[in-house]
Image: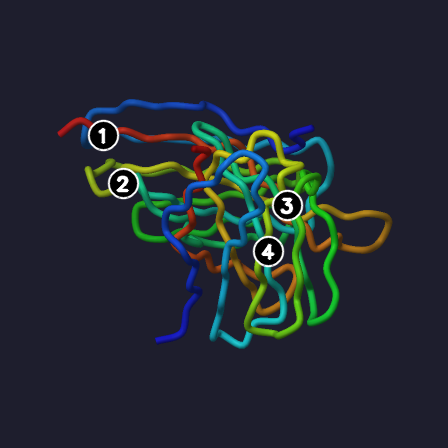
């Protein structure tokens, strides 16, 4: 079954409000990746986090990887209509000491922004 | 420009028919992947290949088959054994098995 849970499933915000989506894994991840999929489009890679406790920023987007490497978050400050889409987290799991090579996706959070 | 090309964009299948979805990449990536996306859901891995002439089952491989005879190509066949094939199919590639993945535009498959 699904091993990477993402919440919330949907979020409606007023333009200018902040937005956060959370990702939780039942197992330790070797890395976490974030993707954005615009309506009718395909997922586009945003960023990868590898280290425990890592924080990375891309303009108004802030990505965090938890200390235990089991959870992550994406925070958008002052949303704009161009932020509309579905945001997916995805992680690679360890099996024993090896990385499986399989990327496990969360269900995604769909963000709608009212102008 | 380098990228991944999936064809066709839309595909219709009759009951009992096998159909093959094409995926070609010119990024020189070793790893390639097939995902299925259903409305309101995340991406589920069907098959993946980390190197030419080798591939592994993903989480939902039943009713699907693949081949990886060339580095650039990773076609997916949806067989008649797949009872609920209507979905959006995405092909992706990556330079290595843990690197970021680049996706094609996808193929929407429907049952007639």
**Mark nearer the N terminus (4 vs 3):** 4
Q: What mark, if any, has residue A83 been given in the picture?
A: 2
Q: Residues within 10 Å of mark 3 (few under 14, many from 20)?
A: many
Residue tagged by mark 3?
A: B46
Please determine if labels 2 and 4 lie on a single subunit. no
What SS does tag 4 mark?
strand
Question: How did the renderer colour the structure?
Answer: rainbow
Q: Is A60 placed left or right of B6 in the picture?
A: left
Please determine if labels 2 and 3 lie on a single subunit. no
Q: Is residue B69 above or below residue A23?
A: below
Residue tagged by mark 1?
A: A113
Residue tagged by mark 4?
A: B33
Chain ID, mark 2: A
Chain ID, mark 1: A
Image coordinates of residue A9 in percent, x first then y, are 44, 24
Closer to us: A61 or B26: B26
Q: CA distance from mark 4 to mark 1?
A: 32 Å
């Amino acid at each position: 079954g699904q091993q990477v849970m993402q919440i919330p499933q949907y979020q409606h915000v007023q333009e200018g409000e902040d937005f956060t989506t959370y990702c939780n894994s039942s197992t330790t991840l070797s890395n976490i990746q974030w993707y954005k999929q615009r309506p009718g489009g395909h997922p586009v890679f945003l960023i990868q986090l590898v280290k425990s406790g890592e924080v990375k920023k891309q303009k108004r987007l802030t990505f965090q990887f938890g200390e235990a490497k089991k959870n992550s978050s994406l925070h958008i400050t002052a949303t704009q209509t161009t932020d509309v889409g579905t945001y997916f987290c995805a992680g690679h799991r360890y099996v024993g000491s090896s990385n499986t090579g399989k990327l496990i996706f969360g269900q995604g959070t769909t963000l709608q922004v009212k102008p | 420009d380098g990228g991944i090309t999936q064809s066709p964009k839309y595909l219709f299948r009759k009951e009992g028919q096998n159909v093959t979805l094409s995926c070609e990449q010119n990024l020189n990536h070793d790893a390639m992947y097939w995902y299925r996306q259903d409305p309101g859901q995340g991406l589920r891995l069907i098959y993946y290949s980390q190197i030419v002439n080798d591939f592994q089952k993903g989480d939902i491989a039943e009713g699907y088959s693949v081949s990886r005879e060339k580095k650039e190509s990773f076609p997916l066949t949806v067989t008649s054994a797949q009872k609920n094939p209507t979905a959006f199919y995405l092909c992706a590639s990556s330079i290595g098995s843990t690197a970021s993945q680049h996706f094609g535009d996808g193929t929407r498959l429907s049952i007639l």
